[in-house]
Amino acid sequence: MNVVSYRPAADELSYTFGGRPAVGTVEPGTVLELYTEDCFGGRVRGVDDLPSAVCEFPYLNPVTGPFHVRGAEPGDTLALHFISIEPARDWAVSTTFPHFGALTGTHTTAMLQPPLDEVVWMYEVDKERRTVTYRARRGDFTVEMPLDPMHGTVGVAPGASEARMTITPDAHGGNMDTPELRAGVTVYLGVNVEGGLFAVGDGHCRQGHGEVCGTAVEAAMNTVVAVELIKGVPTPWPRLEDDAHLMSTGSARPLEDAYRISQHDLVTWTSTLTGLDLLDAYQLVSQGGEAPVGNVCDTNYTMVAKLPKAYLGTPDIYEGAHSRLRTLGERYLASR
Amino acid sequence: MNVVSYRPAADELSYTFGGRPAVGTVEPGTVLELYTEDCFGGRVRGVDDLPSAVCEFPYLNPVTGPFHVRGAEPGDTLALHFISIEPARDWAVSTTFPHFGALTGTHTTAMLQPPLDEVVWMYEVDKERRTVTYRARRGDFTVEMPLDPMHGTVGVAPGASEARMTITPDAHGGNMDTPELRAGVTVYLGVNVEGGLFAVGDGHCRQGHGEVCGTAVEAAMNTVVAVELIKGVPTPWPRLEDDAHLMSTGSARPLEDAYRISQHDLVTWTSTLTGLDLLDAYQLVSQGGEAPVGNVCDTNYTMVAKLPKAYLGTPDIYEGAHSRLRTLGERYLASR
Amino acid sequence: MNVVSYRPAADELSYTFGGRPAVGTVEPGTVLELYTEDCFGGRVRGVDDLPSAVCEFPYLNPVTGPFHVRGAEPGDTLALHFISIEPARDWAVSTTFPHFGALTGTHTTAMLQPPLDEVVWMYEVDKERRTVTYRARRGDFTVEMPLDPMHGTVGVAPGASEARMTITPDAHGGNMDTPELRAGVTVYLGVNVEGGLFAVGDGHCRQGHGEVCGTAVEAAMNTVVAVELIKGVPTPWPRLEDDAHLMSTGSARPLEDAYRISQHDLVTWTSTLTGLDLLDAYQLVSQGGEAPVGNVCDTNYTMVAKLPKAYLGTPDIYEGAHSRLRTLGERYLASR
Amino acid sequence: MNVVSYRPAADELSYTFGGRPAVGTVEPGTVLELYTEDCFGGRVRGVDDLPSAVCEFPYLNPVTGPFHVRGAEPGDTLALHFISIEPARDWAVSTTFPHFGALTGTHTTAMLQPPLDEVVWMYEVDKERRTVTYRARRGDFTVEMPLDPMHGTVGVAPGASEARMTITPDAHGGNMDTPELRAGVTVYLGVNVEGGLFAVGDGHCRQGHGEVCGTAVEAAMNTVVAVELIKGVPTPWPRLEDDAHLMSTGSARPLEDAYRISQHDLVTWTSTLTGLDLLDAYQLVSQGGEAPVGNVCDTNYTMVAKLPKAYLGTPDIYEGAHSRLRTLGERYLASR
C-alpha cells in the first residue's frame, strides 16, 4: 500500500481552485493522510476571537493541496474515497459574521438593514463518545449532538485558466458543504487540467442542512483519502457514491437551479446506467429520489440528488471504483 | 369517541381554499374518516388516459372539505392529527404533463422549447407487502419501492376573502407536497376565518423529494384525521410535529425563500419554546436542523425545516396537542 | 358618447380580484370617469400617520370596481384605454414600512434582522407645473421631479373561483406597478369569468423602476377609462399598447421568470403578428426590445417587454382597438 | 496628448480577468486606441458558420488587454472613458446556440427538453446611415434598427489570485452586457491588484434589454478609451457616469439580487454624495431612479440602477473625472 502523509505549512494553504502549482504529485492508488485547517485558518479559538478581527478577508476557507495525480488528463475522472475524517482538536467553533448566512442580508442579497451581531460559539468535541456539545452564549442552555464529521470543500482546478475562490462551489467542486461527504463516501470529480489538481478542506464536526447561519461546527481534521483515476470517463458535476446510494450535486443560484442541475445529472446518469429511456428515468428518480440540501449560504447554493442503488439493478458504476476503494480503505484502517 | 365519516360526491370536491361554504361542521375532538380523490379526480386510469385529454383544466387536485371547526376564530390554531392514510385502490398513477415539473420549461419559467412528452405510468399498490411497483414504459425494467403514504395538500381558508387554487401552497397550507405529512404526524394551521375551513387531498403512495417530474405516485386515500382546536395561539405558517421532531414549512419562490421562511420560523419557534436568545437559537438550528425538500414544481415551492425535539429539553408544544391526539389515534385504531 | 361616472363609497372599495360582485355593469364603448383611492385608503395624511398604525392590514391597495362588461365571456379580451390619469389632491405620500421593499428582509425573504424604520414622506403635487416635490425627512434637501401619473393596479377576476389580494400581480393583472401604464395607453386583459370584472386602483404621481422602497408617490386619482370588448380573442398575460410600442407583461418570482414570461409572450405575439418563424421573432425581439422593470417589491415581481411597432411593418393589433380608443379619448377630452 | 494604439494578435486575446500578465502598461491620462474582436473571435462569418462547429469552447468572448495602469493599487479606482466605439466591419452577427439564452434550458437552468436550433443571423452595418439591418432566416422579412454601439465586457482582475472567465460579470466587471456602456460614458472600476489590469471586449452594434436570445448584434470594434486613475477611492461594484446620470451595476443570480446590489449601491452612493440620510436616499432613488436591464442570459445576470444627476444638486463625483475625460475625448476627436 502506497501511503503518503502531508501536513501543509501555513504558507502552503490554498485559497483558490486553479491558479497555483501542485504541492505534490500522487500516483493513482495512493492513500493520502492529510491535515486540513478549519475555515478560519485556526485563528478563532475563543468567543472573543471575532472572525472579522482575527481573520484577513478574503483569505478564508483554506484547502490542503492541490495534488497532481499522475496521468490525469481532461476528460478523465478522479475518484477520491474518504477513508476517515477525524477532528484534529478537542474543540470546534461556529460563528455568525456580518453579511453572511441565509437569514441575513448579504453582499449579494443586499439590504439596508444593519448586519446581525457577530457571535462565536465554542464546541467541545468528544471523539470517544462521538458527540459535540453546544452551549448557548446567553443563558446556560447546553445540548449534545452526534459527531458526524464531513468536509465542506473538495474540488479540482477548473479549466481554461480559471481560478475560483475556495468558498465558491461550482462544476469543479469547491465549497459544496454537504453532510453527505462523510467517511465511507467516494467523490467523483471531472478532470479539467493535466494532473487534476485536487484539494480538500473545511472540515465540519457536523452541519445542519443548508448551513443556515453560514458556518458549521468548524474543525481542523486528520483525513485519509484514497485516490484513483478513471481514464476516459468524464464527469460533468461532482458525484458521490456510498455503499447504498448514487448522488449527483448541483451548485448555482437560485436554489431551484442547484436542484435542477443535481436532479438532471441524476436522471441522465440513471438513464445511462440502466438503459432506461430519459422519461422513464425521470419518473423513477421522481418517486425514489431524495434531495438533501447542501448549503444555502455560500456564493453558490448546493443541492444533492440521491438515489438508492438498489432501485437500479446491478449497474456498473465508474468501473467499480467505489467498492475497490472501499476495500483499500478497510485494509488501510486494519493496518493502523 | 366522536367519529364522523365523509365521502364527497364528485360535485362536492373543492378546487380552492377559501371562496366556498363548508361541507360540514365538526366539533374539536372529532375523529374524521375521509375519502380523498387523487389529483386527477380519478380520471387517469390507464396509460392512454392523458391528463390533458381526460381532465378539465384547471380543475385538478381536488380536496375533501372544507370543514368548519366549531369555535375556531382568527388567531387560533387547528391541530390536525393524521391517524392513518391508506390507499383506496390497488393501483396508483403518475404522469408528466406539458409545461409542468422541475426539469422542463413551464408557464412561469417560460421557454421556447416544445414541451416534454406527456406520459402516464401505472403503479401496482400492494397494501399487504407495503410496496408500490414501478414499470418503465419503454423496456421491461421494473422495481419495487416502499409504500409510504402521505397527503400533498392540506390547508385552511386564507383571510381577507382570498381564495387560492388548491395547487398553490402558501401561508394557509395548500399543496405543500412534503413526504413528512405521513400518518402519525400532527399538522398545525393558523385560523384566518371563522371555522377555519380546512380541507385535505392529493394523496401520494410515495414521493421523491421535490416531486421533480411534477407528480408523485398519485392515489385516492382513505384517511383518518383527529381534529383539535387550540384557542388564542396563532401559527404563522403550517407546522408539523411527529413523535421526535418539530417542523416548520415555507412555500415561496425562489426556493431559497421557501428555505428562509421555514428556517426563520423554526428559529423563532425554537427561541420561544426554549427561551434561547434569537442568535443562540439560530446557531442551534444551524447545526442540528434538517431541511427536507417538499416540492420544486408547484406554483410555489415548499421547504420543511426540521429539528429533533430531543435538542430542546422538554418544551411545551401547543399545550401537548400532539401527544393527546396520538393517544386518541391509538384508541381509534384499537377500536377498529 | 356614453359617459358614466363612479366614485366608490369607502365600503365599496375592493381588496381582491375575484370573490365579490360587480359594483356596476358597463356597455362596451363606454367612457368611465373613476375616482380611485390611494394605496393607504387615504389614511396616511402626514408624516406622523404611520401606515402600520393608521391602516388595517391586509386591507391595503383598494381598487375601484369591479365592473361587469356586458357580453364579456371567457376567451374574450377587454381593452381598457386610459384617457387621463390626474391626481385628485395637491399632495401625495410615500413610506417605508416594516418588512416590505426590495432592500429589506420581508415575510418571504425572511431575515432575522430588525426591520427598517417606518418613515413617511409627503410630496407636494403641482398639476400646473407637472411636478412633485420631494423633501428629505432629515435635513433640508428638496428636489422637484416630473409628474408622470400612472396606475399600479389594474386587472380582472381570475378564473375557477379564485380570488387574489389586489397587492398580487399575476396573469389576471393586479398590482403590476409599471410606469408604462400611463394616460394614452391601452391595456388588454384576458377575460376569465362572465363580465370580466375589471377594477383599477393604486395611482402613482410617479414611480422609479422597481418601486425599490415598496411604495411610489401614492395618490388618489381621477381617471378616465374607455372600455372595449374584443370577442373571441384570448390574451394570456396583460398586454399594453401605446402609439409607438407593443408591451407584454410577466409577474412571477424570481425576477428572471417575470422577465421570461414577458419576453416569451412578446416573442410569440410578434411571431403571430408578423408571420415570422419563432426563432426569427426571438432574434428580432432580442435586438430591438426593451425590458422596463415594473415592481421588485410585491408578492410577485413584474417585468414588461416592449417593442417598437415600427419594427413590425403594419400588423393588425387587436383589430385596431388602440387607435379606435385613442380617437374616442380625444373626442372625450375635446368635449370637456 | 498621449495616444497609444494596440491591436492584439490572435494569441494575445484574453479569456479571463486575472490569471495572466499585462499586454502593456499605460500611464494615467493616456488615450488608448484599441481593436476588439467579436465574441466569436471573428469565426462566425456566414449563416453556415455554426458557433458550436467553428468556435472552440470555452474560448469565447475574447477581450483586448489586460493593461497595467501605472500606479494603480488596491483601494484605488480606474476611470475608463469611452471616447468612441465604432464597428470595424460592415457586417455583424447574432446566433442562438444550444443551452444558452433566457428562453431555453441551460446548463444551469437544467431541463430535459432538447435544445433550440442553432441559427445564425447576419446583419449589414451601415456606419454612415447609423443602422443595422435584420433579415429573417425564413421568409423575406427585413427591418432596419438604429446602430447603437456598446461594449458588453469591461473589467479588471479580481483580487486574491482569482481568475474569472470573461463571460461572467461580477464585482470586478466582466460581461455585464448593458447598452448603457456607450461612447460618452465613463466606467469606474475598483482596483483589486497592482496595475488594475483592465481589459475590454464583446462589442455590440446594438442589443435589446437582457440579450434574451443570448447574443447581441456582435461586432469587432475600433474603440478609443481614455484612462484615469483616482487614488485612494474604492469602488465596490462597477459604476458608470454619463453627462446626465449616475449608474451603479449589480451582477448576480437570481435577477432580483442583481437589482438589489445595483440599487443598494446607488442608494449608498447617493447618500454619500448628498449627505442625505440612508432612508432619505432610499426614498429619492425609489421615485427618481431607473433600472435598465443588462443581461438575463450570462452566468450572472446584470442590472443597472440609474439616477439623473440633476436630482442631486451639484455633487462632487469622483473628483470630476467624467468631465475632465469628456474634455480630453473631445480634444482627441477634434485632433483626428
Image (cartoon, coloured by chain):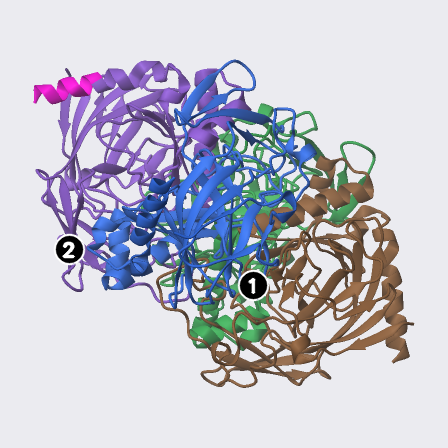
Chain colours: A blue, B purple, C green, D brown
Query: Looking at numbered disc 2 in the image, what kind of residue is underneath it?
Result: Thr
Q: Mark 2 belongs to which subunit?
A: B
State the residue at coordinates (44%, 20%). A143
The secondary structure making up most of the magenta span is helix
On residue B142, which mark appears? 2
How would you rate the neighbour count of disc 1 (Cα within 10 Å): few for under 14, some for 14-19, many for 20 or more? many
Q: Position of residue C50 (x, y in %)?
A: 63, 26
Circle 1 SS class:
strand
Q: Which one is nearer the viewer's eye here, D94 or C19?
A: D94
Q: Which one is nearer the viewer's eye here, C66 or D272?
A: D272
Query: Looking at numbered disc 1 in the image, what kind of residue is underneath it?
Result: Lys
How would you rate the neighbour count of disc 2 (Cα within 10 Å): few for under 14, some for 14-19, many for 20 or more? some
Magenta region includes residue A102: no
According to the picture, the residue beneath numbered tag 1 turns out to be C306
Is residue D68 shown above or below B295? below
- Chain part drawn in magenta: B327-336
Q: Is residue D324 left or right of residue A100?
A: right
Q: Position of residue B223 (x, y in %)?
A: 17, 32
Q: Is residue B262 left or right of residue A62?
A: left
